[in-house]
Amino acid sequence: AIALLHHSEGVAVNDALDVTAAKHLDLSQLHLAARINISEWRNNANSKQYISFIKGKNGKKVSEYFRDFIGCQEGVDGPGETRTLLKAFSDFVESEDLPEEQAREKTKTLVGYASSQAKLGEPMTLTELSGLIDEERPKAFYDHIRNKDYGLSPEIPADKRTLNQFQRFTGRAEGLSISFEAHLLGSKIEYDESTDTLVIRNLPTQLTDQLKRRKN
């Protein structure tokens, strides 16, 4: 841990019950600090977040002179890491085979937490997010990420633009249920307004296997 503190003094009472001046560590006035996770740096070659900083109010960026003093560069790919997290979440929801309503609630929880952290200028914490997504099994999503080796760091910066693209279109009627992420529209999914039809490409293997068995 590396910290830069402004000079601060207070008062204390000594053994003779006299009031004397005393220096103290006031963490509320900690202006600049960095934490370097040596284990993360050694054990996770894909990690770009083994260095984390205390930021000022309203998510103010770390002062450049402090970064230069430590000798590091900001190399976190916020959009990329956020996209990977969302991919991991989609895979998790699919592997759990959740009902549409539960999947929608968990998506709302993820986006709400990520948006809140982005506003605060703080990263998303995988363990905290996992607990919010499934309170009964708080480590389920975290274990899914680790077992599948997505290369995500324990803390991820939330990218607002990427989150906005994670909006889901859903619909259910007469035994038909459709749900997909907004960013798939125009690539894997096309909507023809004139005929009110959807064209879906690259169907999930689980679905195609069922269709083939039904045909045979």
Image (spheres, helix red, strand yellow):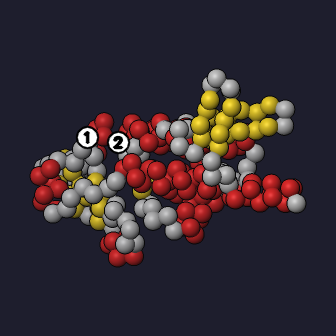
Residue 125: x %, y % from top left: 46, 54
Q: Nearer the viewer, residue 53 or 167?
A: 167
Position above or below: 75 against 9: below
Q: Residue at x 19, y 62 (%)?
A: 72
Say which element carries label 2.
loop
Q: Residues within 10 Å of mark 2 (few under 14, many from 20)?
A: some
Query: Does 93 sit left or right of 172 as displayed?
Result: left
Mark positioned earlier in the residue sequence (1 or 2): 1
Closer to the camera in the image, 186 or 155? 186
In the image: residue 44, left or right of residue 1: right
Indicate the position of residue 39 as horizontal and vertical percent values.
37, 74
Single out the residue that lies furthest toward the top.
Answer: 194
Nearest the eye: 140 or 33 = 140
Residue ID at (68%, 31%): 197
- Does the image show residue 1? yes
Nearer to the camera, 63 or 93: 93
Residue at 55 percent across and 62 percent down: it is 145
Report the amino acid beneath label 1.
Answer: Lys
Contact check, label 1 and label 2, Cβ < 8 Å: yes
- The residue pinned by badge 2 equals 121
Quadrant assignment, res 96: bottom right
Disc 1 target residue: 60
Q: Quadrant of the C terminus?
A: bottom right
Name the amino acid type tagged 2.
Gly
* Residue density around tag 1, few if under 14, some if 14–19, many if 20 or more, within 10 Å: few
- Residue 215 rendering spot, x and y as whole percentages: 86, 56
